[in-house]
């Protein structure tokens, strides 16, 4: 007799934009099948579409890719009514009260939840760790992230939930900046001081379309994160160390050291390039998303739950964002 292993069943909450990206990743893994695509009111043009959330309760896993304000309610419903593992887009919560309620869950329920801070699974994250471990550019003293594009000038933005200032005034902080903030926290721990400066430049919608975040960590390291939906496409990362620096821009990573590099008059000059490699920051994001989804799917396949430390570190980043919004 041939043993045919059935694909693991997944439910998806959400059906377009980011939810569609997640669906496409899952559908390339033949060990899993999206059996239900849920929306509370809209009729989805998909044979798997449903307006009945209960149809997802017997799935092996569920992916929550709905607007931010709905995440908490869906998490609680699946904790109470199913045994599945839960993949939830960031941010986990939109209020401190919701965070406190999640923190009161039983440990076995916390371990069922995975929050998609996918930059932890990125090549940028690997570069930061490798840079710290190798010490080639010395101690890291500052990291600068710039990630921008022109979403706020697209027609579909104006009427989207992202542009709704009444419900999501800090949408870019909660949707994009939170990834870079979590990446910094993941490698450098607790924030000591921060300065958050949100702005609106596009005049489309009523939420902030640009923000600048300055961070200081307990070891003195600082960070700068500039994100915008209201300018041209820019992806740049700069890691500055006591003995050199790493620049990632125009799809190339360049590593410069040592610090003590002088010209003929004895003045400091730019250190020589010791390493140059191709590094596409856009595909870096796409790969990190796939790696994060694969991490979740592997836990379903192996019938494993997640580490409590992952749950608590995700809520810690979420708390930082809520404090910034104050």
Image (tube, rainbow, N blue to C red):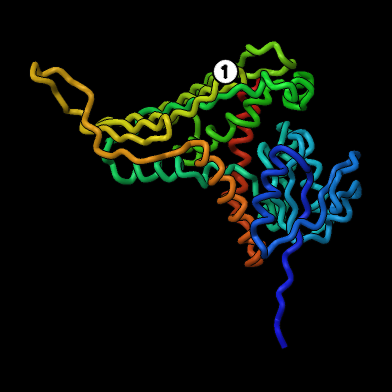
What x and y, as percent, mark residue 173? 62, 26
Question: Residue at the spot x=78%, y=54% of the render?
Answer: 11
Quadrant of the drawing holding the N terminus: bottom right
Determine whether, in the image, residue 249 is placed left or right of residue 102: left
Q: Which residue lies furthest to the bottom in this view?
A: 1
Query: Label 1, on which residue?
Result: 231
What x and y, as percent, mark residue 266? 10, 19
What x and y, as percent, mark residue 50? 89, 49
Give the class, few, some or many, for how many residues have Cα within 10 Å of label 1's Cα (few <14, many ≥20): some
Quadrant of the drawing holding the C terminus: top right
Residue 10 appears in the rendering:
yes
Q: Is mark 1 on a helix, strand or loop?
A: loop
Residue sitting nearer the eye, 170 or 105: 170
Question: Residue at the spot x=61%, y=61% of the render?
Answer: 298
What x and y, as percent, mark residue 52? 91, 49
**Quadrant location of residue 165?**
top right
- As drawn, 208 above or below 122: above
Determine whether, in the image, residue 27 is placed left or right of residue 225: right
């Amino acid at each position: 007799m041939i043993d045919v292993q059935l694909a693991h069943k997944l439910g998806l909450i959400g059906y377009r934009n980011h939810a569609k990206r997640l669906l496409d990743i899952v559908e390339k893994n033949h060990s899993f099948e999206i059996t239900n695509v849920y929306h509370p009111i809209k009729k989805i043009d998909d044979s798997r579409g449903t307006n009945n959330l209960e149809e997802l309760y017997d799935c092996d896993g569920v992916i929550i890719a709905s607007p931010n304000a709905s995440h908490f309610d869906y998490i609680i419903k699946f904790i109470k009514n199913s045994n599945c593992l839960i993949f939830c887009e960031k941010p986990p919560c939109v209020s401190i009260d919701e965070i406190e309620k999640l923190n009161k869950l039983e440990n076995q329920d916390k371990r069922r939840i995975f929050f998609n801070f996918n930059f932890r699974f990125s090549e940028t994250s690997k570069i930061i760790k490798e840079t710290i471990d190798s010490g080639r550019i010395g101690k890291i003293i500052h990291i600068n992230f710039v990630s921008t594009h022109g979403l706020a000038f697209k027609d579909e933005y104006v009427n989207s939930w992202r542009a709704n200032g009444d419900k999501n005034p800090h949408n870019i902080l909660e949707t994009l900046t939170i990834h870079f903030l979590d990446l910094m926290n993941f490698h450098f721990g607790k924030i000591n001081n921060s300065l958050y400066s949100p702005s609106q430049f596009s005049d489309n919608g009523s939420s902030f379309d640009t923000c600048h975040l300055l961070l200081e960590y307990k070891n003195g390291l600082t960070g700068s994160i500039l994100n915008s939906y209201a300018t041209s496409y820019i992806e740049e990362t700069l890691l500055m160390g006591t003995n050199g620096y790493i620049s990632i821009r125009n799809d190339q990573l360049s590593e410069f050291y040592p610090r003590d590099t002088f010209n003929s008059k004895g003045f400091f000059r730019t250190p020589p390039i010791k390493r140059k490699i191709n590094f596409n920051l856009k595909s870096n994001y796409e790969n990190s998303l796939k790696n994060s989804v694969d991490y979740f799917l592997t836990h379903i396949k192996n019938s494993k739950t997640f580490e409590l430390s992952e749950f608590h570190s995700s809520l810690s980043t979420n708390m930082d964002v809520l404090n910034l919004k104050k």
